[in-house]
Amino acid sequence: MKEYSVVPNKDATTWFLKIEDVAPYEEFDKQSTAIEAGIRVAEANKPSRLIIFNDTNEKQEIKTF
């Protein structure tokens, strides 16, 4: 199962979509935009999981596809 995550940068000023918690795949200005992109990528690569972190880098939600 592939794992994707939406995480903030160090200052929580931008958001990264990461694959398998390695290098960032894409960078976004808003968390909501990063989540939308993460959902699209995760749905296209089933079975997969999207882990969403909040601005303090704590797990906020986990979606499974």
Image: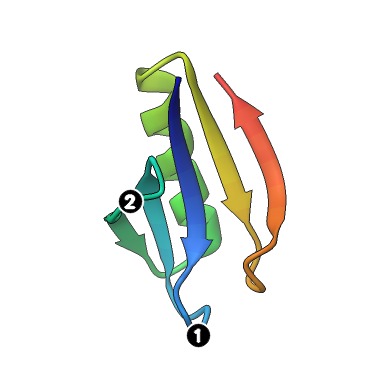
Residue that extends furthest to the bottom in the rendered view of this protein: 11
Q: Is residue 11 left or right of residue 44?
A: right
Q: Quadrant of residue 2?
A: top left
* Image vertical order of residue 18 relative to residue 9, above or below: above
Regarding mark 1 in the picture, which secondary structure is present there?
loop
* Image vertical order of residue 52 relative to residue 41, above or below: below
Residue 16: image x %, image y %? 40, 60
Q: CA distance from mark 2 to mark 1?
A: 19 Å
Residue that extends furthest to the top in the rendered view of this protein: 47
Residue 56: image x %, image y %? 67, 73
Residue type at mark 1 is Asp
* First of labels 2, 1 by sequence position: 1
Residue 5: image x %, image y %? 49, 47
Residue 50: image x %, image y %? 54, 36
Residue under numbered circle 1 = 11
Residue under numbered circle 2 = 22
